[in-house]
Amino acid sequence: MTTATLYEIRQGAAWITLNRPDNRNALSAQLVNELDAHLSAAIADPAVRCIVLTGSGPAFCAGADLKSPPGQMIEGRQGISLPQVLTRMMDSDKPVIAAVNGAAFAGGLGLVGASDIVVAVDEVLFSFSEVRIGVIPAVISVVCLPKLGTHHGMKLFLTGERFTGTRAVEIGFAHRAVPKDQLHAAVQQEIDAICLGGPIAVAECKKLVRRVTQLPRDEAFRETAEWSARMFRSPEGAEGMAAFREKRKPSWVQ
């Protein structure tokens, strides 16, 4: 069986490439299982500071493979479901960057929604196209609506209309939109910026953003005050402050 994904570590980042260009990188059971395994490997590897997810060929991801959907039995074993992969991306202590190289439709937008930073080619097309085949973007709404909000989410879900990478930035679904030949350079800028931060601090920031938005204000102030104190007392915090005082790079910066 040929692999449906590629995995490579470059300059502190694990690059995971969806590699079914003949099928527009559709989310088959095999691809999702491999994606989950690569995510697990990257999360466990201390040499990896962040994870980049991209596609091969003209598309990023066309959505679920209807002939072999995620979660289907593979060689007698239950496959990994799409919610399991999206949860792993969001719960990862390492930032996940979506490098959207081409069209991203339906379930493929779930991968974009679950990523922490999104850099897209400006002219690529996005679409929550499910309604046009009589279904709904149910599972991926969990990770996409927090970014889109009900205002944009309602219109895009109801119409299935296509929108560009540039428009995705305007509505808060992506962070940057760049010409195609600048995509990798733009992603590398994000990687370099992440690598300037302390590894533990970066991981805690991911938790912070997810946690604080779920708390009542008074509880958030109490919890974050304790959180801040722990970080200032931590070895990484001590090293960072010492490096600042001594006008040198902290130990985690190569």
Image (tube, rainbow, N blue to C red):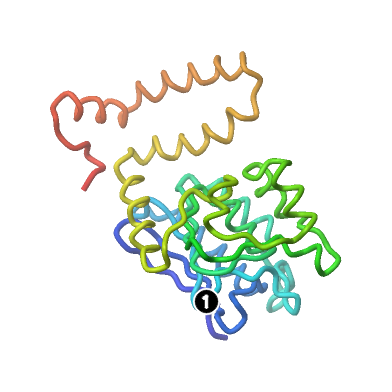
Percent across and percent down for residue 70 are 70, 68
Image quarter in which the N terminus is found: bottom right
Q: Residue at x 32, y 56 (%)?
A: 12
Residue drawn at x 54%, y 85% is: 2
**How far across and down, in percent of the image, does residue 171 sit?**
60, 46
Above or below for 49 versus 242: below
Which quadrant of the structure image shows residue 71? bottom right
Relative to 49, 208 lies left or right: right
SS at circle 1: loop
Question: How many discs mark residues in the rendered view?
Answer: 1
Instruction: Say if 250 sits above or below 15 in the image.
Output: above
Residue 230 lies, in percent from the top left, at 42, 22
Using the rendered image of the protein, determine whether residue 210 is visible from the camera's viewpoint: yes
Q: Would residue 35 be found to the left or right of residue 135 on screen?
A: left
Q: Outermost residue toward the right?
A: 134
Specify the quadrant of the image occupied by residue 212.
top right
Note whether residue 81 is visible.
no
Q: x and y percent of residue 133 in the render?
A: 82, 69
Judge whether 154 appears above or below 222 on screen: below
Three-letter code for the amino acid on which mark 1 is drawn: Pro
Residue at x 69%, y 55% (from the top left corner):
83
Which is nearer the eye, 175 or 39? Answer: 175
The residue carrying mark 1 is 58
